[in-house]
Amino acid sequence: MDNGNNYEVKDISLASQGLLNIELAEMRMGALLKVRERFAREKPFKGLTIGLALHVTKETAVLVRTLVAGGAKIAITGCNPLSTQDDVAAALAKEGEKSGSISVYAYKGETKEDYYRYLNAVISAKPHITIDDGCDLVTEIHTKHPELIKEILGGCEETTTGIIRLHAMERDGALKYPMIAVNDNKTKHLLDNYYGTGQSTIDGILRATNTLFAGKSVVVCGYGDCGKGVSMRAKGMGANVIITEVEPFRALQATLDGYRVMQLEDASKIGDIFITVTGDKNVIDAPHIRAMKDGAILANSGHFDAEINVKFLESESKGKKRRMRQSLDEYTIGGKRIYLCGEGRLVNLAAAEGHPSEVMSTSFCGQALACEFLVKNKCKLKAEVVRLPEEVDKDIALLQLAAMGVKCDTLSEEQKKYLGSWEEGT
């Protein structure tokens, strides 16, 4: 491990490769670069520290540079022990040494102890704004550092699982500062979750296994935005997609979208590849695993490693576990071989590189503009889960369209008047 005044990373010598990867990401993130240009002029975060617990990827580095351009000091760590790209962490550490504006604590394969030590390193920077992916940073502040809350303007949450946890905190009266649900932006959950998770999940499974999807029975557990994206990509590769759901309307949607819908108890007997995208615990549990075919592949693309009962795999295999290749473990249970991708953690980041840069551009526009919204509305927002105004979402979409060279129509005055009135009918 390499250490400096502003960093703890695996290998600082990887910085040059990290810089190249960040450059490649920036080329595909034109919308966020437009936000950066404005931030560089206006300096909305001058004098503020922003603490981040996000996947430390090349795309996240572009967000970090954007916030620094706006005048912020940054302290960042990972939000998942297996999602850090070590070359990017090294590049951020080097940039922080030069500018004094970035501190980074992250490496791929973090122990649980280091994971929480790094969260607390970010907290020790005394952030005025927090950016979270999964709510661990927010939870750590609320439970162990409540004295810092009075100086925090608010925070932003990136993912569905984190929003679920924040709403639980709000219901329990535990949430003590405003949190913007960036995941609720249409330019986040309808792009990042749908297109990003769809492609990157398949990418992660392919890198871990190099299996053929065509002709396989692929069981997707959950038909939310992420599940819809994964199902679409698997179907496009020739898989026979089966959906399992607990929410009746989503099960109906999946049926009308042309997928087979059944209970996991039945699907577990016929599936070849199983993908969880629910945000819940033990979705794939002991009885399901026992019923699976020899050679079944398990992967999780929900935020935490709780969706697949990995503890059961470990205990039931009775030491018959092998690391077959990077990001793929084999468990022998009852004479059958079960393969787990990425240790049951986010397969798109544990075994691949996460979402494509183009998708993260709109997501991180949302994060950057949410931080600006917190600054502009400090002292006005309550300690609750907040949605950004629709106009912000529309502006992000326009920035992305411009970056893609696409123009959309606008309403005429006559059309605006018609849509805004009730007198003119049939």
Image (cartoon, grey):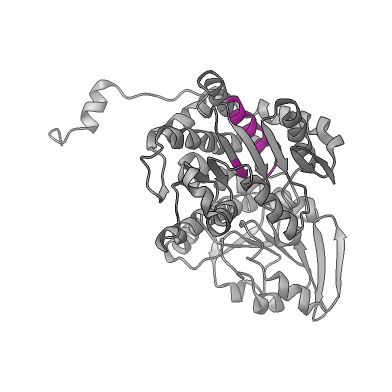
Magenta part of the chain? 51-69
Of 309 and 212, nearer the camera is 309
Please report the residue visible at 74 percent of the width from the left and 37 percent of the height from the top.
6
Of 171 and 378, nearer the camera is 378
Query: Any magenta on residue 52?
Result: yes
From this viewpoint, is residue 54 visible? Answer: no
Q: In what quadrant of the picture does the C terminus appear? A: top left
Please report the residue visible at 75 percent of the width from the left and 32 percent of the height from the top.
21
Q: Residue placed farthest to the top in the image?
A: 41
Q: Judge left or right: residue 148 versus residue 333.
A: left
Residue 58 found in image quarter? top right
Residue 267: x and y, percent? 62, 71
**Looking at the image, residue 89 lies above or below residue 163:** above
Residue 228: x and y, percent? 54, 53
From this viewpoint, is residue 342 visible? Answer: yes
Dominant secondary structure (helix, strand or loop) of the stretch shown in magenta? helix
Q: Residue placed farthest to the bottom in the image?
A: 334
**Looking at the image, residue 195 lies above or below residue 304:** above
Please report the residue visible at 65 percent of the width from the left and 79 percent of the height from the top.
287
Residue 266: x and y, percent? 60, 75
Q: Residue placed farthest to the left in the image?
A: 423
Q: Judge left or right: residue 12 versus residue 38.
A: right
**Looking at the image, residue 276 lies above or below residue 179:** below
Please report the residue visible at 56 percent of the width from the left and 21 percent of the height from the top.
40
Q: Judge left or right: residue 116 versus residue 207.
A: left
Of 263 and 333, nearer the camera is 333
Query: Any magenta on residue 388?
Result: no
Residue 84: x and y, percent? 73, 46
